Amino acid sequence: MHKVDELSENKSAMDDPYFALLQEAISRAHAPYSGFPVSAVVRGVSGAFYSGVNVENAAYPQGWCAEASALSAMVLAGETELDEVAVMANGAAICTPCGGCRQKIREFASGKTRILCYGPEGLRATYTLDDLLPHSFGPDHLK
């Protein structure tokens, strides 16, 4: 894991293509029960960005995560490989994708894929998928 101050490529929020997209998306999250909105942006190998938000449901297990929404948008656009994932939450702690979303990301990414974790102030930390999901199971195991 790399804290933002350790990153040589640290950019201001103004130079960061993810930050504005995450901020715009998080304002549209549907989190009336937890009060914990989350947004995600995935960048496909084409360079296109796909946004998603968490959508809660009164029947709690029926909601879905922001990462799943963003991945769905990417697949709908015809892409099946991604370069990076960015996630934003407003809490004090660094928000990483949940275990289920880590596996969903793995379907379209390698262990070296960067996961960028944001708060309202900007980039907080960067991980690789291997950091978050070591010894993962992916499509290559089924060949």
Image (spheres, helix red, strand yellow):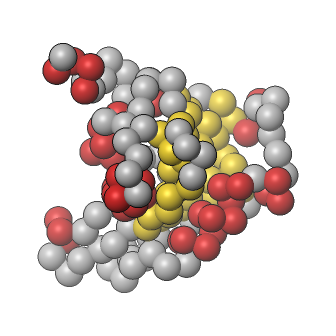
Q: Going by the image, does 45 lie left or right of 79?
A: right
Residue located at (37% from left, 82% from top): 32
Count the marks: how many?
Answer: 0
Residue 105 position, x and y percent, is 37, 40
In this rendering, position of residue 56 left or right of residue 48: left
| Residue 85 visible (yes or no) | no
The residue sitting at 32% across, 18% down in the picture is 135
Residue 17 x, y percent position in the rendering: 71, 55
State the residue at coordinates (69%, 35%).
3
Image quarter where the C terminus lies is: top left
Q: Quadrant of residue 31?
A: bottom left
The image position of residue 13, as x and y in percent, is 79, 57
Instruction: Name the one closer to the observer, 113 or 34.
Output: 113
Left or right? Give the position of 113 relative to 73: right
Query: Considering only vertical position in the picture, is 5 above or below 35?
Result: above
Where on the picture, by quarter, is residue 63?
bottom left
Q: Is residue 99 above or below residue 29?
A: above
Q: Does any portion of residue 101 appear in the rendered image?
A: yes
Q: Residue at x 41, y 57 (%)?
A: 77
Query: Looking at the figure, which quarter contains the N terminus?
Result: top right
